[in-house]
Amino acid sequence: MRIKIYTMTHKRFLEPEDNTLYIPLHVGRAMSRDLGYIGDNTGEHISTWNDRYGELTGVYWVWKNDIDADIIGICHYRRFFVDSERNLLKQVDYERLLNRYDVIVSPGMTADQPYLQYYGEAHNVKDLYAVGRAVKSLYPDDYPLFEQVIHQPKYYYGNLMVTRRELFMDYASWLFSILRQAEQEIDVSSYDLYNRRVFGFLSEQLLLLWITKNGLKAYECPVGITAEKAETVELKLAVSQLVKTGEITQAKDLFYEMLHIRPDVRLELSDIKGEIPVIEQLLYIMEEERDRGIAGLCHYSVHLDQQIAHYRSVAEILKSCGQGRFQEAHGQYFLKNRVSWVMAAVILMNCLVMIPDKAVALEQVKQFYIQAGKTEDAKALEGVRLT
């Protein structure tokens, strides 16, 4: 049995060892430099639509150009189906699962509200209605079910799937006919780079609709994330370089500009190290300390990775403070590394760690500054409001 798991990518990545099973596919190849992988710009393709369709230009290419796979799968350069021990699935695993199930998909996610509202909070909900009208026009028998799936909270993410050839071909034909018709109503000219990929977002709930309407038995397989999102990594690198040269305001401006253009870089599945919220606070701390003439964070280090580690050390100390346990070693750390009242206040106010009692922590830090002869720092903390 011939199985091909196409790995959609727009960047070089660490490929799985089994290159006969996992096949890198460069999506949007027609609009970018050659990565050395198979591109989605040969044969019948929509590679130039990648800015609107995302990884679906690769799905389209597979639909139109794969000629011999018995089982076809879609994964991403950093998202792969894994077993209970977080190992990538092997051919024998796929064969075993598809002997029991019709399709392998990512774990079903549950929003805290109906999907219609959930989608509308992140994107233009009118586009989802356009898809509904396309479904009603092309597949009227599917429309009542479409209404059901958008008014309940479950959804699949990432367009990740593995299934038998005939089912994949049926899905792709059905999916792209709907999206092409909906496209006639959807105007992306005012959308930012993130939201321009609207058809990739819209297709995620259509996968649930297709599985449900066909009564397919789906295996919701764990997904291993092997790397951070490329754009998240690029943002961290760009900010790091500016911080290293002391261009703090420029780093902060770049940070927020990127978040505006690509808000997805701060999502948990993109920022798997959880560093974006920390970097946001560090940039604020550095700017405030500079404007107040305080030699604090930048004195500690101009390397962003070291600053992040330092931030987390201070946060752990404040956690101990909230438990009434400010130790001598904590005070030595504060003095040696010039932890300013600004840094302590910012961490306490944002409370990214579970600090049991922020008021207790604040009082302990104030008392430390007084005992250390840093009365101005203690006085400054008097004005901090934790709520």
Image (tube, grey):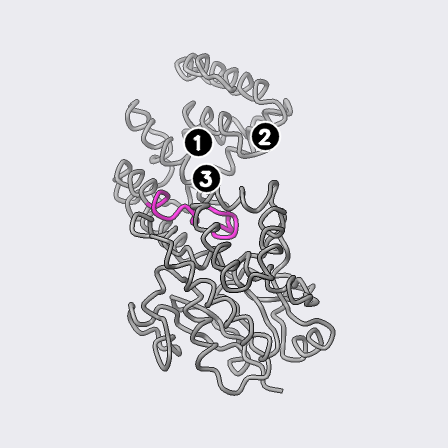
Q: Closer to the N terminus: mark 3 or mark 1?
A: 3
* Residue shown at 42% from the left, 49% from the top: 265
Q: Secondary structure at mark 3?
A: helix
Cα–Cα gap, marks 3 and 1: 25 Å
| Viewer-proximal residue among 124 and 341 | 124
Cα–Cα gap, marks 3 and 2: 18 Å
Residue type beneath disc 2: Lys
Identify the mark at residue 277; answer none if there is no mark: 3
Q: Which residue is mark 2?
A: 319
Identify the mark at residue 336; answer none if there is no mark: 1
Residue 320 horizontal/vertical position (percent): 61, 29
Q: Closer to the N terminus: mark 3 or mark 2?
A: 3
Residue 32 horizontal/vertical position (percent): 29, 68
Front position among marks 3 and 2: 3
Residue type beneath disc 1: Lys
| Viewer-proximal residue among 308 and 181 | 181
Front position among marks 3 and 1: 3
Q: Which residues are magenta?
A: 258-273
Q: Is residue 107 above or below residue 314?
A: below
* Residue shown at 55% from the left, 84% from the top: 69
Residue type beneath disc 3: Pro
